[in-house]
Image: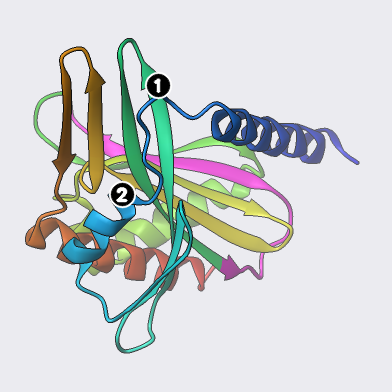
Amino acid sequence: MNRVTLITAMSALRQKLSELFSAQRAPAGYQPGRTLGQLQRNLGLARFEQVSPTLAHAVLDDDSLHLEIRERTESQLLMHLVMTEFSLRLPASAEGAARFELHHGGAIRRTGICCRQRAGEGALLGQLQARLQQDSALHEALMPLDFKRLHIELRAQQWHVRLEHMGGSEVVNRMPAFRRYIALSREQRDVLLAALLGLQRVLRTL
């Protein structure tokens, strides 16, 4: 096992341990599945199946996109957040391991989409950046998209995309007690699905 593969495996292990630890210590007042139920209404997809309290599978009506949607909690002082993470898994022709992070450029106004490599094969960064720039429809969807995190990872000859949107989430406060669901608007829903379709299209060419 080379150094890059070892680092990637250790990173994946840390992520899984973190998710396991979070699942075992759910925040007080957390209601698994509540946020997914709200999100289902926002998405308005006929094919949406909740397979566990915190996990759902969704498919676009034309069968062009298959999604895994997961609830993720984050504890803070006297409150917790429930976020929804949209995931894609695609077969990859490229070998090796790599991890990328996409974010908006610009301090105040969005000036573009930046791609940063966190680990893995350096040659893939240039290829991914070139595909992102060439796909104008994907760029047009990503620019107005209010995403918090967008990670792309290559491992075991599969592309893994994880996108966490700012909408489709819930804020739960203990003192004073309140719950607030942040809806996924119709406009954000449309650019979210367009962005995921675009990422699927781009990664299939790498």
Q: Name the residue under label 2.
A: 34
Q: Which residue is drawn at 43% across and 25% down?
A: 27
Secondary structure beneath label 1: strand
For disc 2, the neighbor class at 10 Å (few under 14, some 14 to 19, many from 20) is some
Q: Say if residue 116 shows up in the picture.
A: yes
- Residue 199: quarter of image: bottom left
In this rendered view, identify the residue nearer to me: 137 or 53: 53
- Which residues make up the magenta segment? 90-106
Q: In this view, does 69 lie to the left or right of 13?
A: left
Q: Is residue 67 left or right of residue 7?
A: left
Q: Position of residue 99 (x, y in %)?
A: 57, 42
Does 91 appear in magenta? Answer: yes
Quadrant of the frame with the N terminus = top right
Under mark 1, the amino acid is Ser
Q: Where is residue 39 in the image (x, y as percent from the top left)?
A: 25, 57
Instruction: Find the residue positioned furthest to the bottom.
Output: 62
Q: Which residue is drawn at 55% across and 30% down?
A: 22
Q: Position of residue 103 (x, y in %)?
A: 32, 38
- Residue 58: quarter of image: bottom left
Does 199 appear in magenta? Answer: no
Under mark 2, the amino acid is Arg
Q: Name the residue under label 1.
A: 75
